[in-house]
């Protein structure tokens, strides 16, 4: 993996291509909020495994601006840890993959309205989210991290008392800080690229996000360091399906068991994450095999 890909900027042309870039032979997607017949999708709409196979395409929501997990590479194609997993899901279902770009705050809504079958967008499992979607078993572990400028490095969360932390809306960073550190002012953005641009421009004292993201970004941006590598509890990341879609949920959980036998996620890590983290993040601190954290 070329590390230069991690700093790629998403331009309008690449982003416009993103929803229809998929495995070879993928058809153009239906309009957002519609089913395959073009009819308005009702809340709670979902497709079973048989329906997905019959259609020939599985719709997977991933990030387009969160390297190294989901981003657009220099060829305008989806790439990253979650995309490698998504490609394998499509292969094992025997269908094409239609990748749908999502933002953190839209992940639940995209499932609830049937815009996607599966969310793989670095989705941290929380009790609140589990009330609205069904999570499969985990494939990754994560906690929060804090990236800040070297000339004003934040190494203790208390240093942010009364200061301004940048977060992305709909993330665990937002909910954690609001619940546990109301003394910290939050500047919120919809997209990860907006958040990192704000930090680069000095519009915040630190960026609080998944530690995996903070570490990766800081390594690609001289002058910034992840001074707090672990903040809050260790959580898990998992794929999610629409509430009640037991068919697809059971398939995903069995897929995790099968992939665990071949150490699939260790190979995914070696391909997409190890070139970024090197020895900074031991593989066993992140990877979950077989769906068992």
Image (cartoon, rainbow, N blue to C red):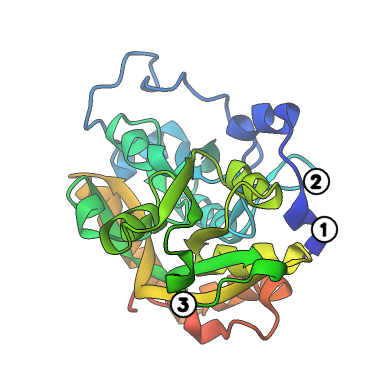
Question: Horizontal and vertical percent for residue 52?
Answer: 38, 38
Position of the C terminus by quadrant: bottom left
Dot 1 or dot 3: first in sequence order is 1
Question: Horizontal and vertical percent for residue 109?
Answer: 32, 34
Asked if residue 168 lies left or right of residue 178, the reply is right
Q: How far apart are marks 1 and 3 (CA)?
A: 26 Å
Marks 3, 2: nearer the viewer: 3
Identify which residue, 186 or 279, lies in the foreground.
Answer: 186
Identify the residue under disc 2: 74
Asked if residue 248 lies left or right of residue 263, the reply is left
The image's mark for residue 4 is 1
Residue at 30%, 50% (x, y): give it: 248
Would you identify the image quadrant in which residue 13 lies? top right
Residue at 52%, 53% (x, y): give it: 86
Q: Is residue 271 above or below residue 11?
A: below
Circles 2 and 1: CB distance less than 8 Å? yes
Circles 3 and 2: CB distance less than 8 Å? no
- Residue 210 visible somewhere in the drawing: yes
Would you identify the image quadrant in which residue 41 lies? top left
Q: Is residue 27 above or below residue 215?
A: above
Question: Horizontal and vertical percent for residue 14?
Answer: 72, 33
Mark 2 neighbour density, 10 Å: few (under 14) some (14–19) many (20 or more): some
The image's mark for residue 230 is 3
The image's mark for residue 237 is none
């Amino acid at each position: 993996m070329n590390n230069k890909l991690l700093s790629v900027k998403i331009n309008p042309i690449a982003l416009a291509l993103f929803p229809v870039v998929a495995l070879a032979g993928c058809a153009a997607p239906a309009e957002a909020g519609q089913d395959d017949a073009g009819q308005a999708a009702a809340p709670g709409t979902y497709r079973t495994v048989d329906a997905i196979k019959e259609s020939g395409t599985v719709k997977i929501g991933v990030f387009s601006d969160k390297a190294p997990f989901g981003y657009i590479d220099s060829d305008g194609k989806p790439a990253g840890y979650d995309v490698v997993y998504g490609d394998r899901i499509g292969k094992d279902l025997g269908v094409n993959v239609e990748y749908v770009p999502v933002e953190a705050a839209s992940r639940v809504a995209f499932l609830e309205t049937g815009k996607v079958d599966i969310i793989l967008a670095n989705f941290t499992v929380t009790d609140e989210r589990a009330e609205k979607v069904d999570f499969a078993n985990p494939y990754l572990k994560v906690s929060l991290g804090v990236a800040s400028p070297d000339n004003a490095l934040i190494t203790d969360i208390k240093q942010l008392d009364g200061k301004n932390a940048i977060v992305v809306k709909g993330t665990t960073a937002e909910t954690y800080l609001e619940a546990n550190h109301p003394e910290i002012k939050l500047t919120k953005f919809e997209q990860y690229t907006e958040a990192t641009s704000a930090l680069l421009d000095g519009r915040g004292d630190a960026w609080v996000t998944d530690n995996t993201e903070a570490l990766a970004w800081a390594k690609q941006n001289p002058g910034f360091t992840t001074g707090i590598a672990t903040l809050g509890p260790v959580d898990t990341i998992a794929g999610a399906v629409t509430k009640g879609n037991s068919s697809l949920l059971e398939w995903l959980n069995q897929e995790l068991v099968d992939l665990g036998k071949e150490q699939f996620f260790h190979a995914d890590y070696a391909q997409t994450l190890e070139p970024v983290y090197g020895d900074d993040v031991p593989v066993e601190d992140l990877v979950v095999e077989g769906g068992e954290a």
